[in-house]
Image (tube, rainbow, N blue to C red):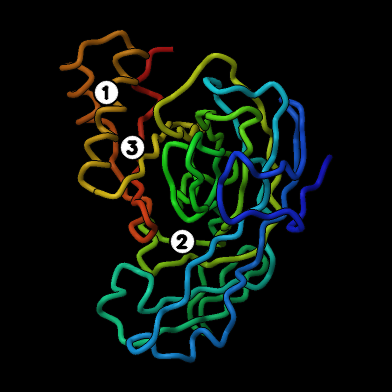
Amino acid sequence: MKLLTTASVIHVMDEENIPAITIVAGETLQVETAKPGIPDEVFTKDYSVEPHPKRILTITGPIYVEGCEPGDLLKVEILDIQLDTRGKMWMGQWMGILKDEVDHCCKRDVLVENGVVHFSETTQFPIQPMIGTLGVVPAGTPVDCLTPGRHGGNMDAREIAIGSTVYLPVQVKGGLLAVGDVHAAMGMGEVFGTGIEIGSTVTMRIDVVKGQSLPWPLVERENSYDFLISGPDLDENCREAVRTTIAFLMQRNGISFDEAYALAGQTCDLKIAQVVNPERTVAMEIPKSILKS
């Protein structure tokens, strides 16, 4: 099995990026993801009187997949996520949903071992490993790795976890997949501004679904599908998630708009994935039990 290390990282998703590795469709690959690199001295300053630090997201890649073309889907099965033992979380005047209400910043180092997050001396909870950033390169203007969209990217969706399969609409030849920003745990919404950021090794099987596409990234789990919708306006993201779900149900079940809208309203769950990135992300969960085979 090939291993892609953190010697090959990017900060911008750009079709001019040189591939770090080339694989064939159906190949299984291990990918190292970076540890949080923010220096501790950042948290000793008062950012009410000086510019706050620039947010930079480091992810591993890009991965060129042979035979992958625009109009295809890249299928990424998350087989395993092995976590490092030291994680970090932080907030400040430049990040987190309450960034305009806090007058200081703070950082906490966290021990992660034996399947447990040691949040404090008195509080522990089980790990929930997830991939914060997984995406292909969008066509045209390069996109900062911090920004999610139709290409995937920094969606911070808890659904992207061990056992999930992610379908990404391909926009450039080879897909140029990249992955990183792994969390040992994170509450839905990522309201603190970070999850428990941690280095990892991710094992993925990467394949191509030829001649099929989707309007937005789709996550398949054992009993459900989730469309992941990102944009600057949370309300509009919610509306787009509902539109996308209705279209999916109409096509899959061969039903009318009214019936699909009603079915979505009674069986599907609209969830907030994250509200702290340059674009917000929502998830619309569709139970497989309502779908025609």
Q: Tell me which label, 3 or 1, sits earlier in the chain.
A: 1
Q: Tell me which label, 3 or 2, sits earlier in the chain.
A: 2
CB of mark 3 within 8 Å of CB of mark 1?
A: no
The crowding category of the residue bearing disc 2, from other C-alpha atoms within 10 Å (few below 14, some 14 to 19, many at least 20), is: many
Q: Position of residue 234 (x, y in %)?
A: 25, 49
User: Residue visible at 62% across and 70% down?
Assistant: 112
Q: Amino acid at mark 1?
A: Ile
> At numbered mark 3, what does the secondary structure look like: helix, strand or loop?
strand
> At numbered mark 1, what does the secondary structure look like: helix, strand or loop?
helix
Camera-side residue: 195 or 133? 133
Work out how far the residue at label 2 is from the one at label 1, CA to CA, in angstroms. 29 Å
Camera-side residue: 272 or 42? 42
User: Residue visible at 26% across and 76% down?
Assistant: 100
Residue 125 position (above or below residue 16): below
Q: Amino acid at mark 2?
A: Met
Quarter occupied by residue 88? bottom right
- Residue 19 in view of the camera: yes
Residue 59 position (above or below residue 159): below
Work out how far the residue at label 3 is from the one at label 1, CA to CA, in angstroms. 11 Å
Q: Position of residue 101 (x, y in %)?
A: 25, 79
Determine which residue is flagged by label 3: 284
- Which of the two marks, 2 or 1, is nearer to us in this view? 1
Give the label on residue 246, or none.
1
Work out how far the residue at label 3 is from the one at label 2, CA to CA, in angstroms. 18 Å
User: Residue visible at 52% across and 67% down?
Assistant: 196
Quadrant where the N terminus is found in the figure: top right
> At numbered mark 2, what does the secondary structure look like: helix, strand or loop?
loop
Determine which residue is flagged by label 2: 186
Q: Amino acid at mark 3?
A: Met
